[in-house]
Amino acid sequence: MIDLVQMIVNGVAVGSSYALMGLAMVIIYKTSEVPNFAQGEMALISSFFAMMLLTSFNMSVYLAFFLTFVFAVLLGGFLEFAILRRAKEPNVLGMIVITIGIEMVLLGFVSWKFGADQKTMPFPIGPYDSFIIGDIFISKLEVLTLVAALLLMSVLFLFFKYSKLGLAMKATQQNSVAAQIVGIRTNRIMMMTWGISSLVGAVAGLLISPTIMHPFMMWDPMLKGFAAAVMGGMTSLPGVVIAAYMLGIIENLFGGYVSIEFKTVVAFAIIVVVLCIRPSGLFARHYVKKV
Amino acid sequence: MDMKRDYYEDVQLFTSPVVIFWFAVLIGSLYLFPLFAGNYYVYVANYIAINIIVAAGLNLLVGYTGQISLGHAGFFAIGAYGTIILMVKAGFPFLLALPSAAFIAACFGFLLGLPALRLEGPYLAIATLGFGLTITQIIGRVELFGGRDGLHAPDITIGPWVLDTDKEFYYLLITLTIFLLLFMRNLIKTRVGRAFIAIRDADIAAQTMGVNILYYKTLAFAVSAFYAGIAGGLYAFVLRFIEPEIFTLLMSIMFLAMVVVGGLGSMMGSIAGAALLCWLDLKLRNILDIPYVGDWLEQLSKHWFSITGVSNIQYIVFGSIMIMIVLFEPLGLYGIWIRTKKYWRTWPF
C-alpha cells in the first residue's frame, strides 16, 4: 500500500514537469497552430543562462531568476519575430521542420558553449531535500514543481478566459483575418504568445535543472510534455495538465508493477492507443474537416 | 518547356536518345567509380547510397502522400536487426534475409499506417515519433537482439562471392539502389502514385473520386517502411556493428531533413538532399580539420565557447539549413535546380 501511494506521489511529481512543458506547447498551439518542437531547447538555453548568471557572475538567486525570465520572454518573442513570421506558406510539415531546426540550432549552441558534460546548478533547494509524511518521501523540489504547475495552469486558464490579451490570443487562433479586422495586431499577439510560452518553459527548465543538467536534459520532459499535450487535445489547458499527471502516474505504476525497463516508452504506447480511440485527444472537441 | 501529349509520354523513362546516352554514362561512371577512388571515398559513397534509399522511401510518404513520419529510424533499426538476426540465428542467406527483414519492417509500417488513417499534423508526428522511440527501447532491452552490447554483422556471401571489403559491397549496394530508385519512379508514375498524390492534395476529394484511402495510405506507410528496412539491412554491413544507440530520434530527424532539404515530392531532391546532408555530416564530425575555417573556429571556441563541445557546431549547421530551406526555398534543392535551369534556358531574356 505504501508502495502504491509512494509511486502515485512520484508519478504526480514527474507529471508536474511534463505538465509545465505541455502547457508551454499548448499556449503556442492554441494561438498559432504550430507544434513547437523547440520548446525544450528554449527552456534549456534559459536554464543554462541562469546557471551562467549564478556561477560566472555571482548574482543573487532572485536577481538571476528574474533576469532569466526576462531573457526567456525576449528569446521567445525574438524567435517568433525573426523566424516563424518569415515563413512564406506555413503548413504543418514546414512548421515542424522549422521548429526542429530551431531546436537543433539552440541545442548545438548550448553544447558548444558549455560542453556536453553534466553540470551542477546552484539552485537554492537541493534535489535531495525532502519532506517525510508517514512513510512517504516527497522532495521539496517536487512540491515546488507541483505548486508551480497548478499555479501556472490556473493563472493561464483565467488569463485566456478573462483578460483582454488572452481573448485576443483566442481570437487570433480562431480566425486571424477577422481578428485583424476588429483591430487586433495578430503579429504582436503571436510574439507575446511565444514570449509567455517561453517563460512557462523556462520555469520548467529551472525546476528540472537541479536534478539533471546537460544539453539533452530537456528531451524527455519535452517529448512527454508534447505527448501529454496531444493526449489532452492540444488546445485545452486543464486537459494537458490532467493528461500529464495521468502519464506520470501510469508510467510510475507500470515501472513498479510490470517492467521497470519499459517505463519510459509506455507513455508513447498509451498515446498511440488514445489517439486511435479519440483522434483529437481526450479533452478536445473533435472537429470535422471539410473539403 | 516539354509538353506531354499523352499518357505514355508521361510515363516513359527515356524521352530522347540524348537522355539514354547520359543515363548510360551515369550508370557506367557509378560502376567504374571504385576503380579510381580510394577506400574512404567508397565508404562515403556507400553511406550516401544507403541514405538515398531511405530518403526516397520517406519522400514517398512525406512528399507524395503528405503524411509525416518522425519514426523512420525505427523501421531502419528493424531492417538492420532483422537482417543480421535472420542470417546469424536462422541461417538465411543474405539475399533472402534482406528482403525478409524489409518485409517485417513493411508489416510494422502497415500497422503504424492504421492509426495514421485518423491522425494528421502534430498528432501524427507524436504517434510516429513514439513508435520510433519504442522500437529502439525494445531492441535495447531484449536479449535476442544483443541488448545494449549490440550485434556484429557476418560476412555476406552471394553464391561463390564473399563481399568483405567496402568496394565489393559498393557494387551490390549501387545495383540495389538503382533498382529501387527505378522501381520507385515507376510506382509514382502509375495509378498507385497518382492515388498517393491525390491523397496529399485533398484526401476527402480523393475518397469521393473513388480512391481507397485505407488501402493507399497504409500502402504508402508499408512501401516507405520497406525502403527504410532495406536501407537498414545494408547499413548494418557498412557499420559491421550495430547497437540500439545508433537508431535515435536524431536519426529520424535527419531523414526528414534530407527529404525536406532535397525537395518534397521529387526523386532528384531526395538524392541531392541525402548526398548533401551525409557529406556535411561526415565533414563536420571533424570540423577542426577543415582548412581555414577550422583554425578560426578553434580560436573562437577557446575565447568564447568551449573546445570540448566544438563538434556540436554540426547541429547548428543542420538546423540552419533546415530553417533556411523552409523559409526561402520550400521546394528545396530541387527548386533551386529548376530555377537555375529555367534561367539558363531562357537566357539572355
Image (tube, coloured by chain):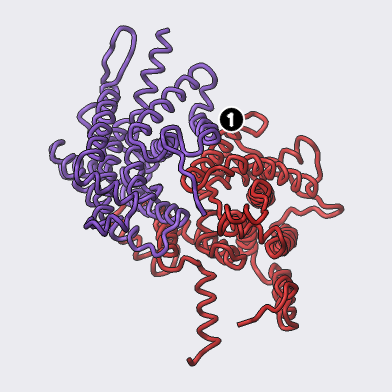
Chain colours: A purple, B red
The residue shown at (29%, 44%) is A197
Front residue of B154 and A254: A254
In screen coordinates, is A68 left or right of B66?
left
Horizontal and vertical percent position of residue B69 = 55, 48
Q: Quadrant of the N terminus of chain B?
A: bottom right
The answer to whether residue A95 is above or below residue A49 is below
Question: Can residue B314 be seen in this snapshot?
Answer: no
Horizontal and vertical percent position of residue B63 = 57, 59
In screen coordinates, is A236 left or right of B281?
left
* Dot 1 alpha-carbon crowd within 10 angstroms: few under 14, some 14 to 19, many 20 or more: some
Q: Secondary structure at mark 1?
A: helix
Residue B321 is drawn in which quadrant?
bottom left
| Circle 1 residue | B141
The answer to whether residue A113 is above or below residue B178 is above
Front residue of B49 and A159: A159
The residue shown at (72%, 57%) is B169
In screen coordinates, is A63 left or right of A184?
left
Horizontal and vertical percent position of residue A263 = 50, 26
Number of numbered discs on residues: 1
The residue shown at (39%, 69%) is B292
Question: Can residue B250 be seen in this snapshot?
Answer: yes
The answer to whether residue B317 is above or below residue B130 is below
Residue A230 is drawn in which quadrant?
top left
**Three-letter code for the amino acid on which mark 1 is drawn:** Arg
The residue shown at (73%, 45%) is B103
In screen coordinates, is A18 left or right of B226?
left
